[in-house]
């Protein structure tokens, strides 16, 4: 009875693993995510709600039902070791999105429910490795971005103080305070309107050319290249991490397939040894010399 249950469970795990690994399963999930996003967008049009309110709600329930089934299939693929299911952050994220609308206090909050439905769009990142690499790269670049923002603020503050001293009295709408000067310089990072700003500064002092040229080199070019370098380095690390995770995910399946028979073989050998010892026990007892 127990062996039959284990056999059925192993077959279920194999079916779920094979289903999850297929490309059409991820494609169907992506299509359902898009349908859910379109339905959410249609609800922003009052006329659509009046005309097709009931079909939109039915479509929402259908998408939710599919997400539940998809999550169950993914959990079924980890039945041999269910703890591995919760080690994947994407599985935990999916589980929270599905369970959260059922929590009291959340299901009554329309805004929270819409945010949770909107968060389902993020699930598209887990379905395709290229999208996951981008998202993981963004996450891994956050520490570097923090340092980049600190350097940017220091550069903007330094040039803002210089701009306030040079143009504060003549151009108060741009450099009247250090805050206004930092905002002006921040908007100039895209070099939009730099020609008019430079011309206005030259009418005040000829030092404006050196001021704006040095600012463009230090902030617009060097800082921009630094940002690109931080993001590219994070994307490269994310790509390596994705390949390592894919190799590690492929390893347990092969190992489990190889380890499962070896465990049964060891149990069978152990039973044979015990049976052999039980058979030899009377012979050993009868051959023991008596004192």
Image: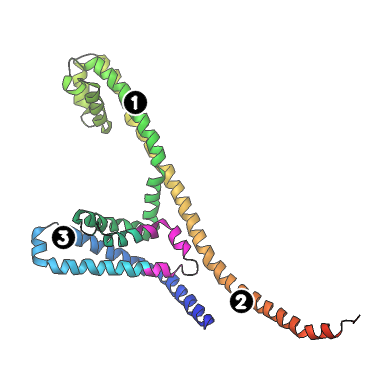
Image spot of residue 161 (x, y percent):
28, 19
Gap in angstroms between the C-alphas marked 3 and 1: 45 Å
Q: Which residue is drawn at 68% across and 77% down?
A: 270
Quick check: marks 1 and 2 in contact, CB under 8 Å?
no
Mark 3: give few (<14), some (14-19) or many (20+) Cα within 10 Å. Answer: some
Q: Secondary structure beneath disc 2? A: helix
Q: Which of marks 2 and 3 is in front?
A: 2
Gap in angstroms between the C-alphas marked 2 and 3: 56 Å
Relative vertical location of residue 149 with respect to residue 53 in this rendering, above or below: above
- How many discs mark residues in the rendered view? 3
Segment tinted magenta in the rendering: 72-93
**Residue lying farthest front?**
291
| Residue under numbered circle 2 | 264
Magenta stretch: helix, strand or loop mostly: helix
Q: In the image shown, does 216 or 15 lie closer to the viewer?
A: 15
> Mark 1 or mark 3, which is nearer the start of the sequence?
3
User: Is 277 covered by the magenta stretch?
Assistant: no
User: Is 80 covered by the magenta stretch?
Assistant: yes
Q: Residue 155 carries which label?
A: 1
Residue 287 in view, yes or no: yes
Q: Secondary structure beneath disc 1? A: helix
Q: Residue at x 19, y 56 (%)?
A: 110
In this rendering, would 55 be left or right of 6?
Answer: left
Q: In the image shown, does 65 or 108 lie closer to the viewer?
A: 108
> Mark 2 or mark 1, which is nearer the start of the sequence?
1
Quick check: marks 2 and 3 in contact, CB under 8 Å?
no
| Residue under numbered circle 3 | 42
Image spot of residue 74 (x, y percent):
40, 67
Image spot of residue 228 (x, y percent):
38, 39
Q: In which quarter of the image is the C terminus?
A: bottom right
């Amino acid at each position: 009875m127990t062996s039959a249950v284990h056999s059925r469970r192993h077959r279920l795990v194999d079916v779920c693993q094979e289903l999850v690994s297929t490309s059409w399963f991820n494609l169907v999930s992506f299509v359902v995510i898009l349908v859910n996003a379109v339905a959410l967008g249609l609800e922003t049009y009052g006329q659509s709600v009046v005309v097709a309110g009931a079909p939109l709600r039915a479509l929402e329930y259908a998408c939710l039902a599919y997400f539940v089934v998809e999550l169950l299939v993914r959990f079924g693929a980890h039945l041999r070791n269910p703890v591995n299911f919760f080690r994947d952050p994407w599985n935990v994220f999916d589980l929270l999105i599905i369970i959260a609308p059922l929590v009291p206090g959340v299901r009554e909050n329309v805004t929270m429910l819409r945010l949770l439905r909107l968060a389902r769009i993020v699930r598209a990142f887990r379905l395709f490795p290229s999208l996951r690499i981008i998202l993981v790269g963004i996450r891994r670049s956050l520490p570097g971005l923090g340092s980049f923002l600190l350097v940017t603020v220091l550069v903007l503050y330094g040039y803002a103080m210089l701009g306030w001293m040079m143009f504060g009295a003549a151009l108060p709408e741009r450099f009247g305070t250090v805050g206004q000067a930092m905002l002006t310089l921040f908007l100039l990072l895209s070099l939009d309107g730099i020609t008019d700003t430079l011309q206005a500064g030259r009418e005040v002092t000829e030092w404006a050319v050196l001021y704006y040229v040095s600012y463009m080199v230090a902030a617009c070019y060097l800082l921009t290249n630094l940002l690109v370098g931080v993001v590219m380095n994070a994307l490269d690390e994310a790509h390596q991490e994705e390949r390592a995770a894919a190799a590690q995910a492929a390893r347990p399946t092969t190992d489990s397939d190889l380890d499962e028979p070896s465990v049964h073989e060891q149990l069978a050998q152990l039973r044979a040894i015990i049976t052999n010892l039980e058979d030899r026990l009377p012979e050993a007892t009868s051959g023991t010399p008596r004192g």
